[in-house]
């Protein structure tokens, strides 16, 4: 049986921090499903379809990461429902700083109450990528700042079209 992990998020846009977590995860798991959330109360810069395309371009074209172990999907259900659908017992979450932990801890606890067979695992991105957030990337883009240290070339091209 394959060891499958689900990495849910909005990825609006995908950053080097996300990519760092993905690279680590494909060294641990047989398959990684990057699950792009359609819902939530966030005001997205990119549509779900655009985010999926950007993730694929960033991973496979810009970073040259193989397609073999990664599947990118959209979802609008509970993450635990997604785990059941893909026969995964692992929800993968990235941590940047201590400030992320309280929210992530609460979310992991709620997911555990929804399905006690599912574990949440946390991976930290490398120190260089821990300060990166999609929200701050969008703010830097709006203010015409240099984005090269935060996002891939494909994302830079598309974010410049939007702001």
Image: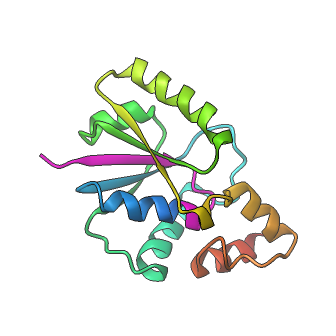
- The question of residue 128 being in magenta is answered with no
Residue placed most toward the observer, 112 or 35: 112
State the residue at coordinates (42%, 18%): 113
Q: Give the colour scheme of this rendering.
A: rainbow
Residue occupying image coordinates x 54% and y 30%: 105
Residue 59 appears in the figure: yes
Whether residue 14 appears in magenta in the rendering, the answer is yes
Residue 83 % position (x, y) = 33, 37
For the point 62% across and 38% down, the residue is 40
Instruction: Indicate whether 106 appears above or below 29.
Output: above
Q: How many marks?
A: 0
Image-based side of 43 in relation to 126, left or right: right
Identify the image quadrant of the C terminus.
Answer: bottom right
Residue 52 in view here:
no
The answer to whether 40 is drawn above or below residue 43 in the figure is above
Please report the bounds of the magenta region as a residue range.
1-17
Task: Please give left or right for residue 66 compared with residue 111 in the image.
Answer: left
For the point 35% across and 32% down, which residue is it?
Answer: 119
Give the percent coordinates (x, y) of residue 21.
46, 58
Q: Residue furthest right?
A: 143
Q: Residue furthest left?
A: 1
Residue 162: x %, y % from top left: 75, 70
Where on the picture, by quarter, is residue 65?
bottom left
3 displayed left or right of 129: left
Across and down, in percent, residue 110 comes to 49, 22
The answer to whether 153 appears left or right of 27 in the picture is right
Vertically, is 36 above or below 98?
A: below
| Nearer to me, 102 or 53 | 102
């Amino acid at each position: 049986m394959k060891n499958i992990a689900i990495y849910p998020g909005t990825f609006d846009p995908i950053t080097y921090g996300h990519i760092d977590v993905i690279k680590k995860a494909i060294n641990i798991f047989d398959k990684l499903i990057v699950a792009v959330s359609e819902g939530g109360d966030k005001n997205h810069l990119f549509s779900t379809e655009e985010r999926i395309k950007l993730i694929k371009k960033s991973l496979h074209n810009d970073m040259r990461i193989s397609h073999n172990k990664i599947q990118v999907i959209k979802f609008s259900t509970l993450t635990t429902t997604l785990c059941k659908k893909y026969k995964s017992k692992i929800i993968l979450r990235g941590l940047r700083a201590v400030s992320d932990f309280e929210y992530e801890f609460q979310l992991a606890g709620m997911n555990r109450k929804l399905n006690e067979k599912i574990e949440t695992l946390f991976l930290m991105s490398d120190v260089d990528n821990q300060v990166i957030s999609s929200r701050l990337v969008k703010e830097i883009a709006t203010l015409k700042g240099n984005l090269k240290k935060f996002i891939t070339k494909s994302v830079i091209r598309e974010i410049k079209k939007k702001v």
